Image (cartoon, rainbow, N blue to C red):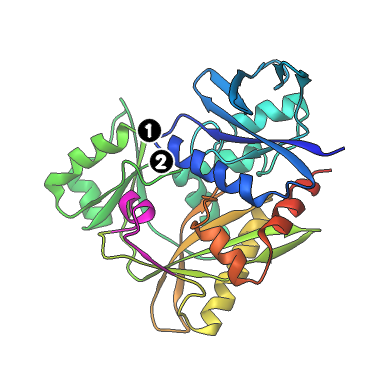
């Protein structure tokens, strides 16, 4: 009997539609000879499964659905929601209660990595990589003046939603006068805003996953864009060069891979993650500065992870099988 796999997509963030594209990618990646896959789309309280030409409601009591041919349950959930509720631990807690295995890390890891400010300050205690200074602002709470923020972090600086799996609401602020508007924009995406000191250097991203207790690190991708930063337009509208493997010194590549593996182990991750870095300094001796940890990275055919899997000489179907079977 084939296992029934729910590819869980959509969600409540601005990247709802991007998530659906990742779901389509996963449908093509997961081995159809071993698994029967259906996309489950979520938005708010509206959950439905795409079953043939029908969209049928999901029973949230047990994550099942009924069709003309009977009652259907799922053996495994492959979560590909970018943002809430799939990247912040909420959905993981739901599946834990139902005893349904899933593709991502657990509730704690998802909640921690989703909260950029909490993650940076948690990792700061381990001193394993460079971490930019930052200030956290909460909606309807006292905050430092714009003058104090600029005095501490300098200009330009980045203003971004603290909890979010996308590039929406992110602004590169070049003047103190533009700070308030950037904070308001980020507040439209999340009730907490992180203002971060600018890191200058080469942007790279490195993916990995666990197979049989060993962490497999993929080749590193260098991210080059003419945009102000790697924003939504650059990410999804082709305004970026993605070079895999990255054009960096072999010693630096080795250290980035080791750092990625160490963070994966230390956090206790599961499934595929992707960590973004800025490399600053002389080639071969760069400081490895962490930007963020993505626990549900994009999985379209042109996303970073499929590119890196191909560059590693691996079959994406085998990687998907490893992740699914690793939970049984």
Residue extending farthest front:
53
Residues in magenta, as a range: 229-242
Q: Is 230 colored magenta in this rendering?
A: yes
Q: Residue at x 19, y 39 (%)?
A: 180
Q: Is residue 5 left or right of residue 44?
A: right
The x and y percentages for residue 95 are: 70, 29
Q: Is 248 colored magenta in this rendering?
A: no
- The residue to which callout 2 is attached is 162
Q: Quadrant of the N terminus?
A: top right
| CB within 8 Å, label 2 to label 1 | yes
Examine the rendered structure and indicate whether residue 325 appears above or below residue 7: below
Q: Is residue 309 visible?
A: yes
Q: Residue 312's quadrant in the figure?
A: bottom right
Q: Is residue 49 left or right of residue 242?
A: right
Examine the rendered structure and indicate whether residue 265 appears above or below residue 41: below
Q: CA distance from mark 2 to mark 1?
A: 7 Å
- The residue to which callout 1 is attached is 190
Numbered circle sitting on residue 70: none
Report how many numbered discs are placed on residues in the image: 2
The x and y percentages for residue 127 are: 54, 63
The x and y percentages for residue 277 are: 46, 64
Examine the rendered structure and indicate whether residue 229 appears above or below residue 323: below
| Few, some or many residues within 10 Å of mark 2 (<14, 14–19, 20+) | many
Examine the rendered structure and indicate whether residue 302 appears above or below residue 247: above
Lower position in the chain sequence, tag 2 or tag 1: 2
Q: Secondary structure at mark 2?
A: loop
Q: Secondary structure at mark 1?
A: loop
């Amino acid at each position: 009997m084939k296992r029934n796999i729910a590819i869980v997509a959509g969600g409540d963030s601005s990247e709802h539609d991007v998530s659906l594209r990742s779901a389509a990618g996963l449908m093509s990646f997961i081995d159809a000879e071993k698994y029967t896959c259906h996309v489950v789309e979520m938005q708010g309280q509206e959950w439905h499964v795409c079953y043939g030409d029908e969209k049928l409601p999901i029973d949230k009591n047990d994550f099942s659905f009924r069709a003309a041919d009977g009652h259907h349950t799922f053996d495994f959930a492959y979560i590909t929601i970018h943002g809430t509720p799939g990247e912040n631990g909420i959905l993981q807690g739901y599946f834990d209660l139902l005893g349904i295995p899933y593709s991502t890390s657990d509730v704690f890891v998802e909640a921690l990595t989703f909260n950029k400010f909490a993650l940076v300050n948690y990792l700061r205690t381990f001193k394993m990589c460079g971490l930019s200074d930052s200030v956290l602002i909460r909606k309807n709470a006292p905050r430092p003046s714009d003058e104090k923020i600029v005095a501490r972090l300098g200009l330009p600086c980045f203003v971004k939603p603290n909890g979010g799996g996308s590039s929406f609401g992110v602004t590169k602020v070049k003047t103190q006068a533009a700070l308030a508007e950037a904070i308001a924009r980020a507040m439209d995406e999340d009730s907490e805003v992180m203002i971060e000191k600018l890191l200058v250097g080469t942007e790279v991203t490195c993916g990995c996953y666990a197979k049989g207790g060993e962490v497999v690190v993929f080749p590193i991708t260098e991210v080059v864009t003419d945009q102000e930063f790697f924003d939504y337009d650059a990410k999804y509208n082709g305004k970026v060069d993605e070079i895999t493997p990255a054009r960096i010194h072999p010693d630096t590549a080795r250290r980035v891979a080791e750092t990625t593996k160490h963070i994966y182990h230390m956090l206790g991750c599961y499934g595929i993650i992707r960590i973004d870095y800025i490399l600053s300094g002389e080639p071969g001796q760069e400081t490895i500065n962490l930007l963020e940890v993505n626990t549900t990275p994009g999985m379209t055919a042109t996303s970073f992870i499929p590119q890196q899997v191909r560059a590693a000489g691996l079959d994406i179907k085998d990687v998907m099988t490893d992740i699914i079977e690793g939970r049984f």
